[in-house]
Every structure is written in C-alpha cells, then in structure tokens.
Amino acid sequence: MQTYLDIFRLKFEAKLSDRQISQALNIGRATISDLVIRFNNLGLSWPLAADYPLDSLDKLLFPGRDYSTQRVLPSWVQVHLELRRKGVTKLLLWQEYQAEHGSKALGYTQYCEHYRRWCAVQKRSMRQHHEAGEKLFIDFCGPTVPIVNPETGEIKPAAIFVATLGASNYTYIEACKGQDRESWLMANSRCLTFLGGVPALLIPDNLKAAVDKADKFEPVINDNYKALARHYGCALMPTRPRKPQDKGKVESAVLIVERWVLARLRHQVFHSLAALNQAIRELNTELNQRPMKHYNGASREQLFNLLDAPALQPLPPYAYEYTDYRIAKVAKDYHVQYDYHWYSVPHRLVGERVEISATQTLIKVYHQAKCVAQHPRSYTRYRHTTDIAHMPENHAAHLEWSPERIRSWATHIGTNTLAVVLAVERNKDHLIQAQRTCLGLLSEQKRYGSDRLEKACALAISRQLPYIPVIKKLLKNGEDMRWQPDETKTIIPGPHTNIRGSKYYQ
C-alpha cells in the first residue's frame, strides 16, 4: 500500500510523468498507468483524508482479489538447516513447500525475501553457511587445568583441545599433556574416532604443532600433520593469520567450553590426565545434548545425527599411529641417529640424505621415497642397532666372530691354545679388543697347522709368556719343533686375582 501512495503522490503532487515515476520507483509504466486509472475511476481526490481507511482503498482498487487467503510461512530454522545439506537449494525447498501448501504458499521471490530478512535478525554465526560434513574447526583453549602430582605436589598444566563441526556445532573436548606436536596429532585422531567419520576439511589455527610457517595464501604445514591428513583422506586448510572470523565456530565453542565445562571444574583437584578427561567426557556429553534456543530447541547431538553424521567419510580400516619424520645424513659408519640411538642403513648410502619415519614401535628409513631399512624402535640411548645385511662384507665377516666362536675354534686346536686365548681376553679391557688379537693367533693354523700351533702355545705357557708375538716368533724360528714336551711339564697359568674363572663365561 505504501508503494501505491508513493505513486499517487508523485503523480498528483510532483506532477511527474509515468516514465519518470517508473524510473524513480523502479516499477513498470503499465502498472503505474493502471493504478492511476483505477484511482481516477473511483472519483477520489488527492490528497486523501487523514482518517481514510487504507484497507478499504486496497479493496476498491482491486475488487476481484481474494483477501481471505492466508499465506503459510515455512519454518525458517528448518529451511536454514536443510540448506546445509549438499545439493539442497532454495528453489528446491520452495518447490517442496509450494507442493505442500498450494495457493497458500509464498511466491519464490517472496520466499527468498522472507528468508533473507529472517537471516538478518539472527546471530552472526547463524548467517555463516557450512555444508554438512565439510568442515571441522580445531583449536586449543587459552585457559589450562592444573594436574597435581599427589606424591611431590608438582603442578603441570593440561592443555584443552576443542573441535567443532561447522554444520551441527557438535563439539569434542579433550585434555592433553601440552600443546606439543604429538599431543596435537593424537588429539586430532581421537576426535575423528569420536565423530565416527572424517570431514572433508580440517581447519586448525596457526599453532606450531600444525603449521611450520603461517601465511595468508600459502601456509607451510608440517610433515607430521600432512601424514595424518593422508591417513584419513582429508584436506588441511589453516586459518589466515590474525583473522579470527575464519574460525568463528571454534572461537564460540572455546568460549562455551570455558564457561560451561572448565568453569564447573574449577573447584576440583585432578591428580592425573585420565581423571581430568573422565570429568570432561561427562560434561562434553551434557553439552552436546543441551537444547539450543536458536535451533528451535534442537541439540548439537540431534543436528549431528541429522546433518553431519550421514555426510562424513568413513574412518580408515586401521588406527592412526603417531609418526615423526626427520631428515638425516648417513654417517661413515652407515648409521643414522634418531632420539639418541643409531640405526644402520645399507653402507652404499654413506653420505646420502635419508628420511626417518619413527613410530612408537618401528623405525623406517627412506631414500628417494623407497624404504631401505627397518628396525624395531629402541629407547636405549647412545647404543647402536645394526643389521648385518647393511654392512660391507669384510665388516660383516669380522662381526660374525663372537668370543664364543673364537673359544670354540681354539678348543678344537688344543687346551694350550684355549689357555692363551683366555689369557689374551683377560689382559684386554673389553672382549671386542681381544677379538682381533685372538683371530691373529688362530689364523696361524692355516700356515703352520694345528699341531705346531698347539705346541707353540704350550711352550709359551711353560715359559710364562702367553703372548701372541712370542708364539708367532716361536713358530717362525721353529723352536716348537725342537722342544720336547716331556722335558718340562706344561704349565697352565693358575688362578690369581686377575683371572675371572670359568664360571664367568657360562
């Protein structure tokens, strides 16, 4: 009716033409001409009386219009929720609405206009459009919760991990030992397990556990987080730096968690992370089941089951295991270091750069995207784990000569040879130091034979000189062949303070 009055005012007061009125009000000239003719046919004069009933004027101008029909408005909350489903449009929803209500339905233009007005009076977060199963917003809360050691009284702050889905606001909360990379990745994994599916996008803040270098256009995401995304088959899209509107969903969720979860725990004392998480899980369930007034009393859990749950991708068949990635250079001893332990790789890779993939139980080494070595993970520091297959042939052959094997060889030659080997081992600080010396002695068997070597060892012992250089000199000079064993009783060094005894080797 206000449009009618504007037309009459411009026509009769401002004396504008139909074309000028059409341009001013953006109304067709035919409509303006029709209204002016209908007004003149009624015999009315402009301006109308102040008390003239405008409803009566509308009926007089259009006497054939049916004013008894009442338009049925749709549930705009339901329309808003349906639009979050993939492939659902306003035109489709209007067609379904018109098919249900027939002549009582709004026209498509008015349908869109009413929906736009409804959105304009809602909260800002309601006006954001998030498709079902598309986005999971992730962040840490600012406040922490203290964990008190009951024995020492030491206090360690626990970080609070929060994730929320864009379409349903379904929220996951967890306490972590800190904001380090492993805690972050494992919390992400447990969150997806809690949801029972995988969204298309993970949207984290620019914390160091997720992003190596923040950038508005090309953020550098760390390799560990990329590996998690590959495992679950989703994409990563960190928010822009200093743009909190990019993560408005999780910012609101963080605020709710601080007020409705952490605030309720402020008087409780927790002695372990598990106890804190148990309390958080109960409050998390309550939060997701609480009705939301802006969604006609629907809870986050109900919206999740309606919108997000059917749209999530399935979880992978096996669970995610935290994996750390490092770049290392192969040392001259064909080993690479990880967590103060050294692991062998094929000796041909000495000097090359390789990638180390470390889980809680396994170490894998890759060269040019190919796995070249694999070892069980060891948590013993400053030790070596070596695969004989990675060693050069001469190194591997040397390693195969254990002290037990050397003593067995000496035993087959004779008791005097064994006595010399044991004496050499006692005189060295470590058995490995004696290994080469003993092998040098036993190798004389190939040159002089077992009998001569055994006899030379007996002669050296009789002179109380059980040393390798002495035995080699005796063999070279042929003294062992001129010596008669029956002339002197073979003397094997008896027990004294420097001899460990036979029980030491059992």
Image (cartoon, rainbow, N blue to C red):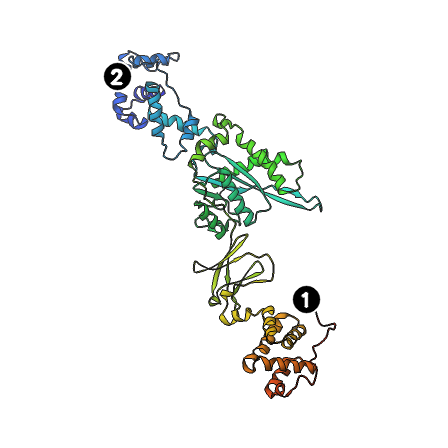
Residue 139 placement (x, y as % from top left): 53, 42
Identity, as a three-letter code, of the amino acid under mark 1: Tyr
The mark nearer the N terminus, 2 or 1, is: 2
Read off the residue under disc 2.
37
Q: Is residue 222 visible?
A: no
Q: What residue is at 46 percent from the left and 32 percent from the top? A: 305
Q: Quadrant of residue 43?
A: top left
Furthest-right residue in view?
497
State whether residue 313 is above or below residue 372: above
Note whether 486 is above or below 244 in the view shown. below
Tell me the quadrant of the picture where the C terminus can be found: bottom right
SS under mark 2:
helix
Label 2 close to label 1 by CB (< 8 Å): no
Where residue 398 appears, as percent x and y from the top left, is 54, 71
Along the line of sight, which residue is nearer the eye, 430 or 381?
430
Report which quarter residue 24 is drawn in: top left
The answer to which of 12 and 466 lies nearer the viewer is 466
Name the element at disc 1: helix
Splitting the image into 4 quarters, where does residue 92 fall?
Answer: top left
Q: Nearer the viewer, mark 2 or mark 1?
A: 1
Residue hosting label 1: 504
| Amino acid of disc 2 | Ile
Q: Position of residue 112 (x, y in %)?
A: 36, 28
The answer to whether 289 is drawn above or below residue 176 in the figure is above
User: Which is nearer the eye, 46 or 267?
Assistant: 267
Q: Give residue 23's mark.
A: none
Residue furthest front in the image: 486
**Is any part of residue 337 visible from this angle?**
yes
- Say left or right for 413 vs 38: right
Residue at x 30%, y 21% (from the top left corner): 11
- Most foreground residue, 235 or 277: 277
